[in-house]
Amino acid sequence: MSDIKKLCKFAVMKLRKSLSRYILPVVSALLLTVAGESCRISYKLNGAALDYTVYKTVSVSDFPIRAALVYPPLQTTFENELLDYITRNTRLQTVDNGSSDLQIEGEITGYDLSPQAVTEDAYASKTRLTITVKVKYTDNKDENNDLDQTFSAYRDFDSSQMLNDVQDQLCQEISKELVQLIFNATLGNW
């Protein structure tokens, strides 16, 4: 009888070891998976930090050029880039009137050229084009989010090039950078 007891005891110990070795990790993994599914962390790679149950509409006003040096296509380039970026990166509906949840308005206050990288013969080998935009952002649902700020961005180009030859491309690149800065500071809430 004692041999049978020993054999049963040995079988129970083996069963416990195999349970702890094989079944326990499977059950643990299953529990972690279920717990992980119920607690999700969500990240938005575009930076938009809006509660779409609160915010539904945005109004983007014209950005007239108020700079001393004027390049007329810049206004259209900048405004289109801003509207396109908002449309691509949010679910807000753009409206023309001022009765929107969010309003973005402003003006292009600077369009400046400055010499850069002066060589030993006192000539600049590079020229910098800087565009400055003043933005007023109004959150009609929460005035703590309102913003009145100036943004600047620039690009350098070789001084041997004529501004007329590179102006469109530079304005496009600078506008894209300015729009990202503005979006992050306003709708992105960074």
Image (spheres, rainbow, N blue to C red):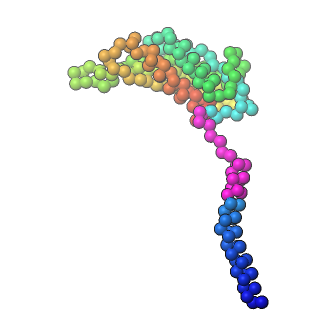
Decide if residue 183 is on the left or right side of residue 8.
Answer: left
State which quadrant residue 188 falls in: top right
Where does residue 86 sit, x and y in percent of width and height?
Answer: 62, 25
- The residue shown at (63%, 19%) is 60
Q: Residue at x 42, y 15 (%)?
A: 167
Quick one: which residue is furthest to the top in this view? 72
Answer whether residue 30 is magenta in the image: yes
Name, please, the residue furthest toward the bottom: 2
Residue 108: give x, y in percent of width and height.
Answer: 52, 17
Res. 115 in view: no
Q: Quadrant of residue 79?
A: top right
Is residue 74 rendered to the left or right of residue 52?
A: left
Instruction: Tell whether 138 sits left or right of 134.
Output: right
- Establish if 17 lies above or below 173: below
Name the image quarter holding the C terminus. Answer: top right
Q: Is residue 27 magenta?
A: no
Locate residue 51 relative to residue 45 in the image: left or right. Answer: right
Q: Which residues are magenta?
A: 29-47
